[in-house]
Amino acid sequence: MPKGVGVSAGIGVGPVRRMAEPIPEPDAAGQLRGDAGSEKTRVAEAVKAVSADLKARADKARGLGRDEAAEVLEAQVLMASDPGLVDGSAAKLAAGTSAERAVFETFGTFRDMLAAAGGYMAGRVTDLDDIRDRVIAVLTGQPVPGIPESDEPFVLVAEDLAPADTAGIDADTVEAIVTVQGGPTSHTAILARTMGIPAVVAMEEADALAEGTPVLVDGTTGEVVAEPSDEDVAKARTLEAKRAEAAKAATGPAATADGERISVLANIGGPADVENAVKNGAEGVGLYRTEFLFLDRADKPSYAEQVKAYKAVADAFPGQKVVVRTLDAGADKPLPFVSTEEEPNPALGVRGLRLAFKHPELLDEQLRALAEVQSESTADLWAMAPMVADMRDTEYFVDKAREAGLKTNGIMIEVPSAALTAGHLAKVADFFSIGTNDLTQYAYASDRQVGALARYQSPWQPGVLRLIGAAADGAGAEDKVCGVCGEAAADPILACVLVGLGVKSLSMSAPAIPMVKAALALHTVEQCREAADAVLGAVSAEEAKDIARAHLPRLEELGL
Ligand SMILES: C=C(OP(=O)(O)O)C(=O)O
Ligand SMILES: [Mg+2]
């Protein structure tokens, strides 16, 4: 049975709808058809139609409370309303160029200007390309690229999804997502999990799935069945019902079968995610990715704006833990208000805490804002630094956070050097939180954005498991808490192994919380430890998972 990597749990059934193929570059020698005046009108109308469609999608996203998606679309509407696009095309039409080529070249001029501006502006190039392709599609009668519009539920099949594509996904009609590319920590995977849409990535065979073919997708196992029989669907539905029942029953504080408490927390990007976290039974926040407040805007958020956002999250969890990660930007997540240099290897560049060495004022202000929230809220606020590599980084952050008045100050373990020297770092940091997404990328030298490297990007890789074990041991020796806030924590089977490795808190996308609680509740710490000891001997990610299953006898009760 064809199998990819299951990255977002659940069953989806429906006909395949493929993302329309990318629009090819129009012929450079394309000649004007008809007269320049009427072709200009056609171009203007195409731009208007695209703009109206984007506006309608922005309004829909707003209505669904998906403000980030709406903002991306609204910015595109603004771009499309620049009169220079139609005027520039008109000049080329007058010179005898075809309408589609004229549009392509005019957008190209704007594209070059954006790219040359660097930083935030350069980040908008793909949004501009998207508008260009939509306009050309309208002019030439090709299917509009992007998510197919449909009122009937369907399974979305794509090569990969760009952030701009995912903004258009409607969880009510998209039954499941299957992509050829993409790893478990790719944008597609994280978004699908957050939206609760079953998803399978890194599935080569998905290329062969024809439009309209009925398929059955199991986002837990990664299996995709074409033309499933009624029996296949019924079996999958039974399994899903079993999982749903187990998840529903998993309320209350998380603990293993023998009563060891494990904190099960939510990963959030801002106050808008709080409701979903609470609904799914989060016992607090294990990772608040504050960079979303700083990205995609021309000026940095003010001190007051920061306090407001952090306080909104803290106040939602009275008496509970809220771990706030300081700005994790730079390199591939450029900030327009911070000058950064072009880097040949952005993932290995000036990102995360490293940005603060050059711009300490950003970190200082953020820490002050957090200290104010700490004093005004009853939440147990913890501050955490991203991309810490060594002792000097650790001391730098912890000293600064303490000076600002923050009480509990820890570090992310997402660089292998930090995991391997955890014993030293635990003497200074108050806690660790392992970011398995980056830890896997750095341990296996495989960029997490590159779908072709999905095989390496599994947190089940024995090398990653050993690094996690080293970090947990280092924390344990100093009596410090070690948690995991990478996507590994969202896998209920791996969650048990992590507990066996000595991890005390697990933070994940909210929809994953109930199943993780359910898996922990069925297994003792001893069983988790035995599973952990055994997986450390595995030679591959697949073998590690099989070994873990063999040591966790009650997974079957969860339909896993
Ligand atoms: C949690 C992590 O951080 P992010 O995914 O935001 O890089 C990680 O790297 O695992
Ligand atoms: Mg990270």
Image (tube, grey):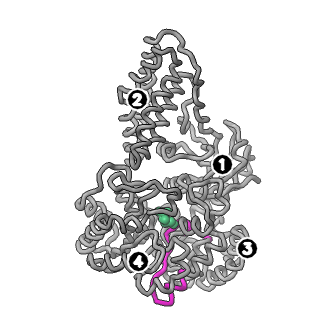
Residue shown at 59% from the left, 67% from the top: 440
Q: Nearer the viewer, mark 4 or mark 2?
A: 4
Q: Amino acid at mark 2?
A: Ala
Of the two numbered discs 4 and 1 on the same chain, state the one appearing first in sequence.
1
Image height of 354 relative to 97, above or below: below
Q: CA distance from mark 3 to mark 1?
A: 26 Å
The spot of residue 388 in percent (x, y) is: 45, 73
Please report contact status of discs 3 and 4: CB closer than 8 Å, yes or no.
no
Q: Amino acid at mark 4?
A: Gly
| Residue 331: in magenta span | no
Q: Amino acid at mark 1?
A: Val
Helix, strand or loop at label 2? It is helix
Q: CA distance from mark 4 to mark 2?
A: 47 Å
Mark 3 CB lies closer than 8 A to ligand 1: no
Q: Is residue 533 left or right of residue 301?
A: right
Query: In the picture, residue 121 is in which quadrant?
Result: top left
Query: In the picture, residue 209 is in which quadrant?
Result: top right
Of the two numbered discs 3 and 4 on the same chain, state the one appearing first in sequence.
4
Q: Which residues are magenta?
A: 471-493
Q: Which residue of the protein is positioned furthest toward the right in this rendering?
A: 1
Task: Say which residue label 3 marks.
Answer: 539
Q: CA distance from mark 4 to mark 1?
A: 37 Å
Query: In the picture, residue 7 is in which quadrant?
Result: bottom right
Task: Say which residue label 2 marks.
Answer: 52
Residue shown at 77% from the left, 53% from the top: 1
Tell me the crowding category of disc 2: few under 14, some 14 to 19, or many 20 or more residues within 10 angstroms, Cα based. Answer: some
Task: Say which residue label 4 marks.
Answer: 410
Q: CA distance from mark 3 to mark 4?
A: 32 Å
Q: Is residue 410 left or right of residue 548?
A: left
